[in-house]
């Protein structure tokens, strides 16, 4: 409970600072005439942004997934708290604290390693360093932040060694996460697939499944290099979907950021259907679990079908937000009313 409150406070402060940065950036772009003249309705106003930090904190605290994780006494709450303070330190512009909290998050569950890229991009923007591969200042700051992160991680791991007087915790923690030996049913994609697979194929498919979390980082970094906070939101969602042992607390963390992107609602295509899918799956999880484990009138296929539907719903939700974000950014620079060369109305299609 305490860690959940700390997470909510950290998210509140982080989004409060982020909104100030967004407002200043919008004001600057308007003064430089970077926006099209007919997009005034797409610009976020201070009144719209005022309650977003509070909404984010409440979305996290009152989310049923957060409440269930708290009741279950899941250690995911600790990881969420560390990630929230990492986001706060990043938005505040503290490279040292950002690296330390990222190292702590990586030390706990490995997958937050992928948050290194959005954090670096945000800190580079904060320092007004151009994101260009030929820039010496870019590489100097990247090496500086990477060194802080790696040194922090090494110190934490060495402290663990001094406490335990053994390196056995490395295969027990990180080896366990990567090799997926425990196939206890959960809300993830791994357990059923590997329970049904021949053992001599498992190593190859473990590598294929695990690479999903890391594979999207580079293309997203290229596409969203000017928007590192949205990049971080998408990356948190990818972690919660594709990690080997996901929990409801992981879902609650990235869903807390949905009010930050409330200005994208007009461009979302399937938000109602996807919301219904996620809600119905959430109700069916305990029902099918009871029918399978206790009543014996169902089998693992029923439960995995809901798990698969739930994760597909999350993937489509994030894809919908990604599409809406790109569409809004295009309209901001090209105008809401697009026309062809012959003067007829054009339709925007993103490929």
Image: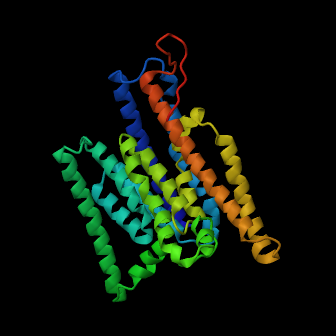
**Where is residue 254 shown, x and y percent of the image?**
53, 53
For residue 303, side relative to residue 222 (left or right): right
The residue at the point 29 percent across, 55 percent down is: 95
Is 284 displayed left or right of 325 in the figure? right
Give the quarter of the image for residue 196: bottom right
Residue 259 in the image: above or below residue 252: above
Image position of 66 with respect to 107: above or below = above
- Residue 332, quarter of the rendered image: top left
Near-viewer residue (234 or 4)? 234
In the displayed structure, 221 sits above or below 171; it is: above
* Residue sitting nearer the eye, 261 or 349: 349
Q: Where's residue 7, x and y in %?
A: 49, 59
Q: Is residue 187 visible from the viewing direction of this image?
A: yes
**Residue at horizontal 39%, vertical 67%?**
106
Q: Position of residue 64 (x, y in %)?
A: 65, 58
Looking at the image, how many numbered discs can be counted on the residues? Answer: 0
In the rendered image, residue 304, in percent from the top left (x then y), is placed at 68, 65
Name the residue: 30% across, 54% down.
94
């Amino acid at each position: 409970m305490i860690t959940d409150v700390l997470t909510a406070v950290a998210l509140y402060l982080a989004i409060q600072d982020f909104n100030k940065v967004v407002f200043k950036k919008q004001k600057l772009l308007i003064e430089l005439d970077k926006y099209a003249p007919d997009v005034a309705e797409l610009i976020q106003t201070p009144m719209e942004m005022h309650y977003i930090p509070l909404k984010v904190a409440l979305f996290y605290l009152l989310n049923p997934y957060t409440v269930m994780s708290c009741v279950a006494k899941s250690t995911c709450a600790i990881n969420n708290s560390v990630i929230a303070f990492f986001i706060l330190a990043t938005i505040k512009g503290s490279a040292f604290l950002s690296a330390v909290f990222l190292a702590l998050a990586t030390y706990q569950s490995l997958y937050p390693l992928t948050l290194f890229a959005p954090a670096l991009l945000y800190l580079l923007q904060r320092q007004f360093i151009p994101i260009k591969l030929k820039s010496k200042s870019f590489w100097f700051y990247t090496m500086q932040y990477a060194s802080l992160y790696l040194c922090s991680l090494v110190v934490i791991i060495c402290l663990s060694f001094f406490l335990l007087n053994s390196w056995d915790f490395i295969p027990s923690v990180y080896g366990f996460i990567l090799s997926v030996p425990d196939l206890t049913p959960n809300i993830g994609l791994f357990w059923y697939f590997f329970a049904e697979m021949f053992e001599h194929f498992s190593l190859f498919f473990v590598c294929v499944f695990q690479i999903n979390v890391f594979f999207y980082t580079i293309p997203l970094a290229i596409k969203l290099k000017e928007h590192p906070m949205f990049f971080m939101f998408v990356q948190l969602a990818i972690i919660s979907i594709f990690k080997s042992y996901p929990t409801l607390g992981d879902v609650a963390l990235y869903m807390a950021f949905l009010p930050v992107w409330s200005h994208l609602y007009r461009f979302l295509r399937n938000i109602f259907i996807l919301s219904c899918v996620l809600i119905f799956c959430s109700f069916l999880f305990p029902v099918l679990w009871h029918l399978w484990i206790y009543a014996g009138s169902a089998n693992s296929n029923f439960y995995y079908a809901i798990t698969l539907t739930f994760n597909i719903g999350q993937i489509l939700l994030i894809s919908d937000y990604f599409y809406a974000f790109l569409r809004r950014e295009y309209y901001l620079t090209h105008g809401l009313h697009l026309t062809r060369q012959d003067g007829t109305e054009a339709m925007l299609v993103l490929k």
